[in-house]
Image: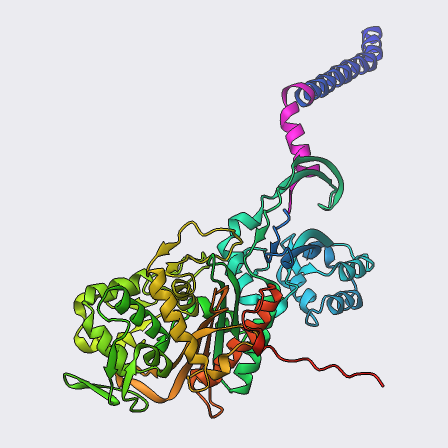
């Protein structure tokens, strides 16, 4: 018995060791099998999933901004151009470690309010992307880079620059911070100018910073250039003269349009007051309005040549007709008045003296539908179709609602409204021997939409009558153009006062004309709103602007003088 117990006790440790060894071997084999299985799962079964997850963390597709097309004048001079810049953005989570003096230095460089970036870090601590400055000057962005702040990043973009500043601001318009057109031709031709953004594949580090470009996925497609009909030389001349006139006459505002009489191209369209599209901070939206194309006014006596032409062309008035005006004309309970009693007038003096009474008599001779058709064909009551966003249509009441007095006031420019551009367009029918042109803000050679409104014979005779307006005893002697014959018509229009009729102290001073009168090349319409420096007549306020702009524009275009005897004499001093 004793020997048996001793042998059993001797065998027990050896058996325990063997069991533990077997357990360890089995455990290690199981672990190896698990690791082999996991390796197979990762490298074979889940390979694509893991690759996608890895790419998401390291490889990224980013947008590449497209170059926005230029806007140029007809001679190729830049009116709007994009320049490469950088936008600065931050990751607030990463920027927490930055020192306060570093943040203040960055704010100072970017012209940000003190504490702006610190505030963003506190407010947007969960976000990983916040813009702090858009479209920064490259020199400034380089200075910010030199601070070497962790969490500050840069994105390449383009900034729109307008070389002519306020001179062409109302026509060209501007873009917003995302380079999307907001006003003017920038807005109207957004799709053409914008282009298509590209994309590229990049590698980011663990902090989402781009460390390497891998490949271009899609090249950006630049926007197309837009060539306007505007001649920047004439645009500047018109801008300067209108600005001086609005200031000198203490006027509320002003608008001026220059048209090519041969094909309807808009060579200049300016407004006052203007604005600088490069710095638009704190500007009122009313300053952005292109009054020359979007604002309307009653054109007043500037429409009288159309009435005479319509009456002659329709045979309702003979070329040798005489009108006994007597200063007043009673129409029912209403009275039409002239400024003076002009007595008996022929057609030339009707235009020269601007008789309301005489044109009212002519209007009543014409059937309402015929009269309305002439105005409608001239473009009153319909958009001029230049393609400018928000272009005005004006108003022209349906002839079926006309009374005799309505016909009378329409003959001297009340009861309808038009923009300066619409009026200038209507004058193409007087300038181009009866042919009315469409208008265009884009450069073109021919007008495919021109239509005849009056006969050439009628228009030539009316144009001769309009030349007398610029004579000494006419209403617009100040509109004469040295070296050239010119023809035109004044308009001094009382401003409407709603239900109270018309004001007695507020006026539109208007002048519309063309030169050279023998074969017109240019048409200019000048409208000055509420001149308040003592004079308010179109012949004294707007006519001088017409004279200066027309003289300069004809010389810019190298149009030969047709009246050399009126050219100023340049005296040269002889030597000793």
Identify the residue at image location x=43%, y=70%. Answer: 420
Residue 250 visible in the displayed image: yes
Relative to 308, does residue 159 appear above or below in the rendering? above
The quadrant where residue 538 appears:
bottom left
| Quadrant the C terminus occupies | bottom right
Is residue 50 inside the magenta stretch? yes
Q: Residue furthest bottom?
A: 534
Residue 13 percent location from the top left of the image: 82, 15
Colour mapping used in the image:
rainbow
Q: How many marks?
A: 0
Question: Does residue 569 appear left or right of residue 259 in this picture?
Answer: right
**Which residue occupies the foreground of this view, 489 or 14?**
489
Front one among 326 and 275: 326
Q: Is residue 173 above or below residue 353?
A: above
Residue 392 lies, in percent from the top left, at: 39, 65
Query: What's drawn in magenta, residue-wise?
Result: 43-65
- Rendering quarter of residue 112: bottom right
Q: Position of residue 115 (x, y in %)?
A: 69, 70
Residue name at image x 47 percent, y 62 percent: 261
Q: Position of residue 85 (x, y in %)?
A: 71, 56
Prevailing secondary structure class for the magenta stretch in the rendered image: helix
Q: Is residue 173 visible?
A: no
Which residue is at the front of the view, 25 or 570? 570
Q: What residue sits 17% from the left and 76% below the top?
A: 404
Q: Quadrant of residue 144?
A: bottom right
Please, is residue 284 above or below residue 45 in the view?
below
Q: Is residue 245 magenta?
A: no
Placement of the N terminus among the 4 image quadrants: top right
């Amino acid at each position: 018995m004793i020997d048996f117990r001793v042998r059993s006790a001797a065998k027990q440790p050896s058996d325990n060791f063997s069991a533990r060894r077997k357990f360890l071997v089995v455990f290690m084999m199981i672990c190896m099998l698990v690791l082999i299985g996991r390796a197979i799962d990762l490298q074979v079964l889940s390979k694509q999933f893991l690759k996608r997850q890895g790419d998401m963390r390291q490889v990224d597709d980013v947008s590449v901004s497209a170059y926005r097309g230029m806007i140029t004048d007809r001679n190729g001079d830049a009116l709007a151009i994009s320049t490469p810049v950088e936008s600065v953005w931050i990751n607030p989570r990463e920027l927490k470690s930055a020192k306060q003096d570093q943040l203040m230095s960055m704010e100072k460089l970017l012209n940000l309010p003190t504490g702006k970036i610190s505030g963003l870090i506190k407010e947007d601590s969960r976000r990983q992307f916040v813009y702090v400055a858009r479209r920064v000057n490259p020199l400034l962005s380089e200075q910010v880079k030199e601070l070497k702040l962790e969490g500050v990043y840069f994105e390449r973009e383009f900034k729109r620059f307008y070389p002519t500043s306020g001179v062409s601001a109302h026509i060209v318009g501007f873009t917003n911070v995302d380079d999307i057109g907001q006003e003017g031709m920038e807005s109207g031709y957004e799709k053409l100018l914008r282009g298509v953004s590209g994309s590229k594949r990049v590698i980011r580090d663990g902090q989402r910073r781009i460390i390497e470009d891998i490949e271009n996925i899609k090249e950006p497609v630049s926007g197309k250039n837009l060539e306007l009909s505007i001649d920047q030389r004439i645009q500047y001349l018109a801008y300067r003269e209108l600005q001086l006139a609005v200031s000198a006459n203490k006027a509320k505002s002003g608008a001026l349009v220059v048209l090519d009489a041969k094909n309807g191209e808009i060579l200049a369209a300016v407004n006052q007051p203007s604005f600088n599209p490069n710095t638009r901070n704190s500007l009122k939206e009313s300053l952005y309005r292109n009054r020359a194309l979007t604002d309307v006014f009653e054109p007043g006596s500037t429409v009288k040549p159309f009435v005479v032409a319509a009456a002659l062309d329709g045979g309702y008035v003979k070329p040798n007709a005489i009108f006994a005006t007597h200063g007043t004309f009673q129409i029912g309970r209403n009275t039409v008045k002239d400024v003076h009693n002009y007595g008996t007038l022929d057609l030339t003096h009707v235009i020269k003296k601007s008789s309301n009474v005489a044109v009212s008599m002519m209007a009543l001779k014409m059937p309402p539908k015929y009269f309305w058709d002439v105005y409608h064909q001239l473009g009153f009551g319909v958009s001029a179709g230049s393609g400018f966003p928000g272009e005005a249509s004006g108003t022209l009441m349906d002839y079926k609602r006309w009374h005799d007095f309505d016909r009378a006031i329409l003959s001297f420019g009340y009861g309808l409204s038009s923009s300066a551009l619409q009026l200038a367009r209507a004058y193409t029918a007087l300038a181009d021997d009866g042919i009315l042109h469409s208008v265009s803000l884009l450069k073109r050679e021919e007008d495919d939409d021109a239509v005849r409104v009056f006969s050439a014979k009628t228009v030539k005779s009316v144009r001769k009558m309009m030349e007398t307006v610029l004579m000494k005893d006419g209403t617009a002697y100040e509109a004469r153009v040295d070296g050239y014959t010119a023809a035109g018509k004044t308009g001094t229009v009382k401003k409407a006062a709603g239900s109270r009729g018309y004001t007695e102290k507020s006026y539109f001073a208007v002048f519309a004309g063309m030169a050279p009168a023998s074969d017109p090349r240019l048409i200019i319409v000048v409208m000055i709103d509420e001149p308040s420096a003592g004079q308010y007549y179109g012949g004294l306020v707007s006519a001088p602007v017409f004279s200066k702009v027309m003289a300069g524009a004809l010389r810019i275009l190298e149009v030969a003088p047709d009246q050399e005897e009126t050219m100023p004499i340049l005296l040269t001093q002889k030597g000793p």
